[in-house]
Image: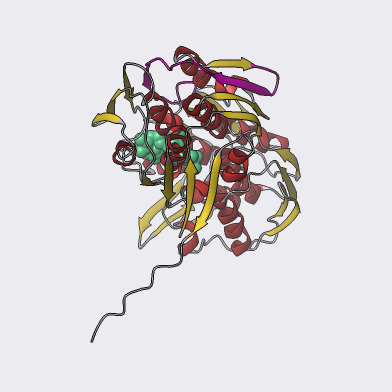
Amino acid sequence: MTKYVIRGGKPLHGEVEISGAKNAALAIIPAALLVDGVCRIENIPQISDVTMILQILQELGADVRTVNRTTVDIDCRHIQNSQVPQEMARKIRASYYLIGALLGRFGSAEVPPPGGCHLGDRPIDQHIKGFVAMGADVDVSGGFVRAKAKNGRLTGAQVYLDMVSVGATMNIMLAAALADGLTVIENAAKEPHIVDLANFLNSMGADIMGAGTDVIKVRGVQKLTGGTYSIIPDQIEAGTYMAAVAAAGGEVLIKNVIPKHLECITAKLEEMGVEVEEHDDSVRVRRTGRLSRANIKTLPYPGFPTDMQPQITVVLCLAEGTSVVTEGVWDNRYRYVDEIRRMGAHIQVDGKIAVIEGVDKLTGAAVQACDLRAGAAMVIAGLAAQGTTEVDCVHYIERGYEDIVRKLSGIGADIRVVVMPEEKKSVQAG
Ligand code: EPZ
């Protein structure tokens, strides 16, 4: 087991470079299945979820060549089968994109239901609603999602999503790119990574309009040709480093960002007394005085991102006064609160609402990462706390944060990786 050991209480100073967006990469890489040619994808984040989705494509028969640390060439022309190995697909949430991509390419798909962080119920009924509307028969049984286009090829359809869903919006776009006719997705998600997937597909010859609005139109084409595409910077990684400076104090230049994608996070941090200076492709974040309280409700983009909820809640633990956080997307995204209470936080949770009484300081403790973003929040708490914090289960963090220990050390954090000897399995007597 690996853990991070953090000696907190030191303000952060220096510069940090943001990597490619995890939730864009996890949709764009499976999208290569639709392309009749070589896709060169640049600015790919070096994180374990991306490694896993690339391995799944290779398992399917794709030719994946590493060009450099953040660039791969993917050639899916020789893939024959549309069956995804169960043990790999269950490890990540984004494996569900394989259904839309394989269905769009082959007219059939057989994919295990996705894994991913435990945030409450995570159904895929809206994804299935879209596939069925486009003429697929879908059966979920025996540990697989099996989808088959009635006439061998999907047909365009009108799909009104019951709720705003990033995954369903992406998956229906993937299935519709090569379908016969026009697909209209209404009540579509508008996150930056939705736009990035649409831009990737269009750069390969697709015909998608309206991404970034709540109505996306996809006119199916006969084929997609290869090309080169660079993934956008990660909005949530950038927001996480902004929150780290807010909590620990100091001044950091966060480079390789798109400030527009950070507007909601910036506005909330400024409300809390943090200074944020926007430049073309960077933001300078400074916090010297006491933090002020704030209320936050997480919402689909352009609202405050749910994937920043644990991180901003930790910052609010150190703000003067009482703050209220309402989780507007997931049913159960406060599992980390018990961990942060070990460090002296005063938080009460009732369903989707957390009431935070600010404290003067947090104190270091042994805590666990219970999911990807909660793990990042524990690291932020450790950076701000007096004393030493040990964060366990860091594999969750490494699913979505490239080189987080190196990047934080580069801005003055006292953080190191400690590998624990594997616990000896007790031999059962008799
Ligand atoms: C994506 O998950 C992200 N994951 C999540 O980020 C993120 O929290 C979420 O979008 C919201 O922004 C990836 O992109 C791999 P949804 P996804 O479909 O697609 C309900 C991270 O930390 N819903 O937008 O699974 C669902 O239960 C991860 O990077 C249905 O009911 O989220 C939730 O309440 C964590 N039926 C809401 O909609 C469906 O068919 C939003 O889910 C689909 C969703």
From this view, report whether residue 181 is shown above or below residue 359.
Answer: below
Specify the quadrant that holds the C terminus.
bottom left
User: Quarter of the picture for ligand 1?
Assistant: top left
Q: Which of 423 and 139 is in front in this view?
A: 423
Q: Is residue 275 visible?
A: yes
Give the residue drawn at x 56%, y 52%: 48
Where is residue 32 shown, x and y percent of the image? 65, 48
Q: Which of 342 and 39 is in front in this view?
A: 342
Q: Viewed as shown, does residue 69 lie left or right of 337? A: right
Name the residue located 30 percent from the left edge and 36 percent from the top edge. Answer: 341
Residue 200: x, y in percent? 67, 37
Q: Is residue 107 above or below residue 203?
A: below
**Is residue 310 left or right of 206 when viewed as pictured?**
left
Locate residue 372: give its quadrant: top left
Question: Which is the main secondary structure of the residues drawn in magenta?
Answer: loop
Q: Is residue 88 magenta?
A: no
Residue 168 seen by the camera:
no
Location of residue 281 (image quadrant): top right
Q: Give the range drawn in magenta.
A: 278-304
Residue 139 location (% of width, % of height) = 38, 54
**Residue 98, percent across and down?**
53, 51
